[in-house]
Image (cartoon, rainbow, N blue to C red):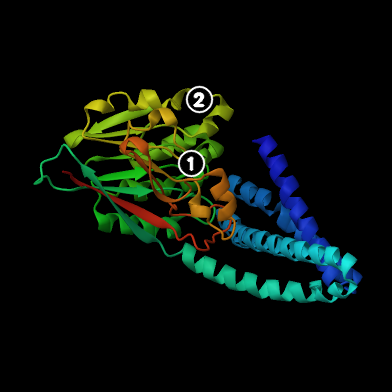
Amino acid sequence: MILFLILFLAIYGSMHGYAFWRLWAAYPHMPGWGRAALAGWLALMAAAPILIHSLDKWRWFRLADLAGAVGYCWMAVILWFVAGMLVVDGYNLLVHGAALATPAAKSALLPYRLAVPVLGVLIAIALAVGLYQARNICLRELSLEVKGWAKEHPPVRLVQISDVHLGVLSRQERLGPIVEKIKELRPDVLISTGDLVDASMDAIEPLADMLAAVPAPLGKLAVLGNHEYYAGLEDSLAFHRRAGFTVLRGESAMLDDGIFIAGVDDPAGLSMHRGDFLDEQAALAGGEQANVVILLKHQPRVRAESIGKFNLQLSGHTHGGQLFPFHLLTRIYYPLYRGWSNLPGGSAIYASFGAGTWGPPVRLFAQPEIVVLTLRPGV
């Protein structure tokens, strides 16, 4: 975790340094006090994630949320600004190269004093749209045929939530609409595929009661994501228990009518030497006798030895990319980063966009969702 923080601060701080350099290039005649104010603001925003985490840890929740609203929205702004300015720099570098052969090509250079305000307008629009999209949760309906059921068998409804990230900027006002939507769906089974928790128990304890009030006749099942480990394993497990979830840690549960659900921990547990709960083969053992096998796994990665042993893997983690165009990077690291993908051996995976956000409370072209999976009799 310490190594992660050092790496994060180095990269995030460098981004702010680059932004200062480019803004100075755009406005070279900025007065000394203006440069000092700009440098101070960028330094404060570079340190904001640590400050926000500290405020939340000290139980100054309202102040943490206020600082988070500013600091995390700024995170989206700086990401877009740096990406945009890198494109401008790349373009100008190509023009400089062309100017070596044709000096007149220099006239095509894009001046920073023009690029900065244009980029600023685009970022303002993206931020407004992203804030709106992040607050509008959609329903994603999936269907899976169960071959062992008679055609008159009533459908069974599973509702999946993922990546709610309860904590800073995601407390009662965020969870409330999610809970109400789930209640309206009347799930037989409620499933969480990780990163439900993103803060210590004392910061989010009352939210567990909201989830506990959601009826799910066949049970509530969950797996741990990486943020459950970051928030504190024992606190995360205590929150799930209070919310009524059974956490599957390399384990399985056989529900009524041969519905077999297995789950494993996130590999983040390895950093805490808690890798005993990653064995998919042990979790899936016994599924051969079930009518349908569903594997819960936070990250949308598929093990070759597990293919054919489950009908559907439900995952999350990627947030569908969350911020355009950074989904392109997510897609490189997680090829099955969002949506439904068919696999060999009759298996499939669905990677949820998730219901919450991490960092910026913003989603651009990656709308949050609650997934409704209906199990129906098959042929």
Quick one: quadrant of the C terminus?
Answer: top left
Residue 322 position, x and y percent, is: 53, 56
Image position of 146 with respect to 49: above or below: above
326 vs 291: above or below:
below
Q: Identify which amino acid the numbered label 2 is placed on.
A: Gly
**Where's the N terminus, which quadrant?**
top right
Tags 2 and 1 touching, CB below 8 Å: no
Horizontally, residue 221 falls left or right of residue 3, namely left
Disc 2 to disc 1, how far (Cα)?
23 Å
From the viewer's perspective, is 320 left or right of 29?
left
Counting from the top left corner in percent of width and height, residue 249 is at 40, 29
Q: Which mark is residue 275?
A: 2
Along the polypeptide, which appears first: circle 2 or circle 1? 1
Front: mark 2 or 1: 2
Which label sits on residue 48?
none
Q: Residues within 10 Å of mark 2 (few under 14, many from 20)?
A: some
SS label for mark 1: helix
For label 1, the residue is 201
> Which kind of residue does numbered mark 1 sit on?
Met
- For the question of whether residue 249 can be seen, the reply is no
Please tell me whether mark 2 sits on a helix, a strand or a loop.
helix
Residue that appears at 49% across and 68% down: 132
> Residue 57: x and y, percent?
59, 45
User: Quick one: 338 or 19, which is closer to the camera?
Assistant: 338
x 61%, y 46%: residue: 58
The residue shown at (74%, 60%) is 86
Other residues around mark 1 within 10 Å, as few (<14) / some (14–19) / many (≥20)? many
Closest to the observer, 172 or 10: 10
Number of marks in the image? 2
- Residue 351 position in % (x across, y down): 42, 47
